[in-house]
Image: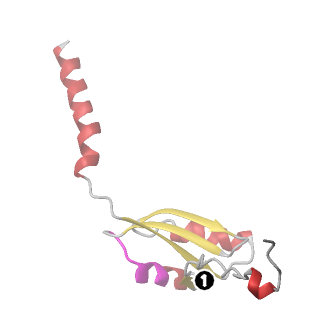
């Protein structure tokens, strides 16, 4: 019984304390890549997924983008971009589209010529 209790305490300690000490430095980027078919996506998934530090990769054929999550302690962006060049699929970091609202027309009654009732 003591062995099972000790084993349970050790497992509980390792499960609860390991995430506290592990430093996770993940970064997610969106890359614009010239992909035109599912074969291109498969080629990227097979090669880039095994690069050191890559945690997750999602290929979107409709928007021709790759969403890449990687560990910054193991690799960096220039290294990943070189890996794309090796497979003849050069990639660029896609800039986020600005979400600025269009300016509303502030036309008043005086501007439109409408009369105000008294």
Q: Which residue is depicted at the point 58% across and 79% down? A: 98
Is 2 inside the magenta-drawn segment? Answer: no
Left or right for 48, reference 117: left
The secondary structure that most of the magenta stretch takes on is helix
Q: How many marks?
A: 1
The colour style of the image is secondary structure
Q: Which residue is depicted at the point 56% across and 68% down? A: 67
Callout 1: few (<14), some (14-19), or many (20+) C-alpha neighbours within 10 Å?
A: some
Write down the region rendered in magenta: 74-82
Query: Residue 1, how many percent across, how many down?
Result: 20, 12
Tell me which corner region of the image, top left, top right, bottom left or bottom right, holds residue 87. bottom right
Tell me which corner region of the image, top left, top right, bottom left or bottom right, holds residue 54. bottom left
Is 76 inside the magenta-drawn segment? Answer: yes
Left or right for 79, reference 24: right
What residue does disc 1 label?
89
Of residues 79 and 15, which is closer to you in this image? 15
Left or right for 113, reference 97: right
């Amino acid at each position: 019984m003591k062995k099972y209790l000790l084993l349970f305490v050790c497992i509980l300690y390792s499960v609860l304390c390991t995430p506290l000490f592990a430093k996770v430095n993940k970064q997610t980027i969106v890359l614009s890549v010239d992909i035109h078919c599912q074969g291109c996506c498969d080629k990227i998934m097979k090669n880039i997924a095994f690069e050191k530090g890559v945690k997750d990769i999602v290929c979107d054929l409709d928007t021709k983008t790759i969403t890449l999550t990687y560990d910054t302690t193991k690799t960096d962006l220039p290294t990943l971009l070189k890996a794309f060049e090796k497979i003849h699929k050069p990639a660029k970091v896609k800039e986020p589209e600005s979400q600025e609202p269009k300016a509303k027309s502030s036309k008043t009654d005086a501007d439109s010529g409408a009369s105000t009732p008294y």
